[in-house]
Amino acid sequence: MKLFVCVNQVPDTETKVKVGQDGKTIDHSEINLILNPYDEFAIEAALQIKDKTPSEVTYVSVGKDSNKEVIRKALAMGGDKGILIKVGEIADSYSVAKAISAALKDSGADMIFFGKQSIDYDDAAVGTMVAEMLGLPSASVVVKLDVKEADRKVVCEREIEGGKESVELTMPCVITAQKGLNDPRYPALKGIMAAKTKPIQEIAASEVSSLTEVVEMRKPAAKQPGKIIGTDKSAVPELVRLLHEEAKVI
């Protein structure tokens, strides 16, 4: 089977994000970049299939040269090779999906995996857009996966509002992985060393313009200091006055 896992490079969740001087982008000078956490569940799902069935696992990332770091991290966990789709500027979800779909259109993929969302923009859109662009069935926020290679079927359990549902897909298909699907493995020393020599192919992104434009980026306003106006019922009249005159909520 030919399995593709799309991975992204994102700021560490513990990073204190700063807005760049242009007011439209993040200042990357002091940011630690990591493999998108949700992508680790997608990686593990593909590797578990490879453990049971002869398969080739390829990692795909859209970005600049620094994205090779997350491809190498994924290769250290397991897998065979990587593809870096190079872009010069920051791309929106549509252009990322367009670049991935163009690169994988004639790949012969049996399954394409994504994390359910990337923690930088959190729009959870790229995986389903790639499925639509390639005309493939898809299942999102998948928490359980059963691959029936002989029948070319994939049975997924996915989270929905208030419960879960089971869906059956026909290969080739697209899966977006949710936390709980598996427990991602840690790269072993042998895998880390092997990843250094595994090939990463570089290709230019298809010429697609972003459909959205960031006009301003700013941090949330600082919270106003709280007030303690009393500790018993005598404070109620003053509380009501402040809620009416200052907070203007009543």
Image (tube, grey):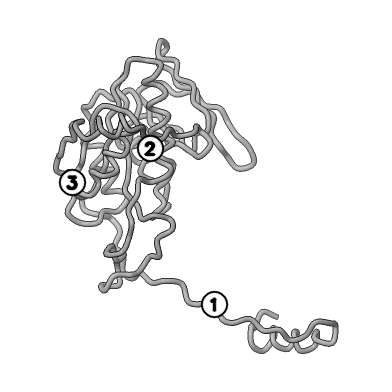
The residue singled out by tag 1 in the image is 223
Helix, strand or loop at disc 2? strand
In 3D space, how far apart are the residues under numbered discs 2 and 3 (Cα atoms)?
18 Å
Q: Residue at coordinates 66% horizontally, 79% vertically from top-left? A: 249
Q: Earlier in the sequence, mark 2 or mark 3?
A: 3
Q: Is residue 109 above or below residue 12?
A: above
Give SS at disc 1: loop
Which residue appears at 64% of the width and 83% of the height? 247
Q: Is residue 153 above or below residue 236?
A: above
- What residue sits 38% from the left and 72% below the top? 218
Kindly identify the amino acid type of the residue bearing the numbered disc 3.
Answer: Lys
Residue 61 is marked as: none
CB atoms of marks 2 and 3 within 8 Å: no
Q: Please state if 106 lies on the left or on the right of 40 as rendered.
A: left
Pointer 2 local density, CA inside 10 Å: few below 14, some 14–19, many at least 20: many
Residue 86's mark?
3
Say which quarter of the image contains residue 73. top left
Q: Quadrant of the N terminus?
A: top left
Give the quarter of the figure containing the C terminus: bottom right
